[in-house]
Amino acid sequence: MKILIIGGGNMGLTYAQSFLRSHITNKSDMMILEKSPEKAAILAQKDIGTVFGRPEECIPKADLVILAVKPQDSPKLFEALRPNIDPQQVFLSIMAGVKIDTIGAALGAPKIIRAMPNLPAQIGMGMTAFTSSEAVTRIELVTVQNLLSTTGKSIYVENEASIDAATAISGSGPAYVWYFMNAMTSAARDMGFSQSESELLVSQTFKGAIDLYNKSSLSCEEWIDRVCSKGGTTEAAMNAYQLGDVHRKIVEGANAALNRAIELGKQ
């Protein structure tokens, strides 16, 4: 299978490197389309496939085309791609908010897969939700899932609306985690720890808590109950969070991200 990645940014580069590292494809079957001459030159030096600057040079050669560009750039991109498209090609989009019907109509292509990865895909720890149009065959879907899984874990969802929801949870989610980590690091600094000590205390605490959660069958609520003791320090922190309605604020933030993803799809 010949793969064309359109966009040589963070995710485009992550996919190219992950696919090659997993030996699921090879450099001779990997192509990257990058409109910026400066970025194209940098990508060419990485030796991860053939780099092109114009759609007509590479689109006709591809079996799978990955759309890894910003959503706001999609109208111009679709216009440039359409004259060179074969209806049998499969298109995988990771553009937030851009619907399958929108992509299919703009490209004149029936086989569309829409996915939402997240940034930890860069280290093989990503989370990707994906769905597809009816024209995509089961074999094509399994092939794409195998590609996506080289960057972490992936789940198929039947309802396209779940992609917007995944955008709000796993797509934007790392920023929520880092926001909380930053607050805890600031608290540690205020308590007298150095910056490096604060970062170690917080990062190892997060890593340990997540690993412990993943290796057990207990829910978050059950783990909280295990850590909290009557009148203890953890209970004091939980009471402060409840008083500040932190739980509701986090849910509101995720819903704000969801609403924005829906808005992007309407533009």
Image (spheres, rainbow, N blue to C red):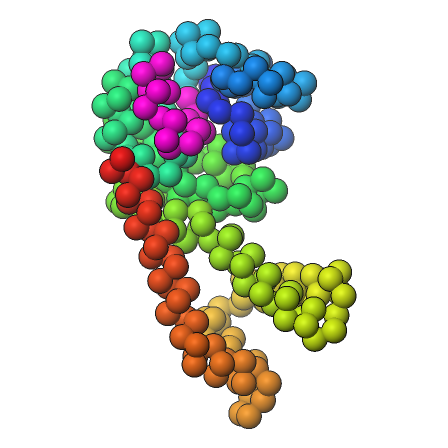
| Residue in view at x 41 percent, y 41 percent | 116
Q: What's drawn in magenta, residue-wise?
A: 65-81
Instruction: Tell me: residue 86, above or below residue 21.
Output: above
Which residue is at a point 35% across and 20% down the rendered structure image? 76
Horizontal side, residue 156 vs residue 20: left or right: left
On the image, the x and y values in percent for residue 222 come to: 47, 77
- Name the spot of residue 68 as percent of width and height, x first: 45, 29
| Residue 202 position by quadrant | bottom right
Q: Residue at the spot x=35%, y=26% of the render?
A: 74
The x and y percentages for residue 111 are: 30, 25
Residue nearest the observer in this picture, 230 or 22: 230
Establish if 210 lies above or below 115: below
Is residue 114 highlighted in magenta?
Answer: no
Nearer the observer, 153 or 10: 10
Does residue 207 show up? yes
Check the image and report above or below for 172 versus 211: above
The quadrant in which the C terminus is found is: top left
Q: Is residue 160 left or right of residue 171?
A: left
Q: Residue furthest top?
A: 57
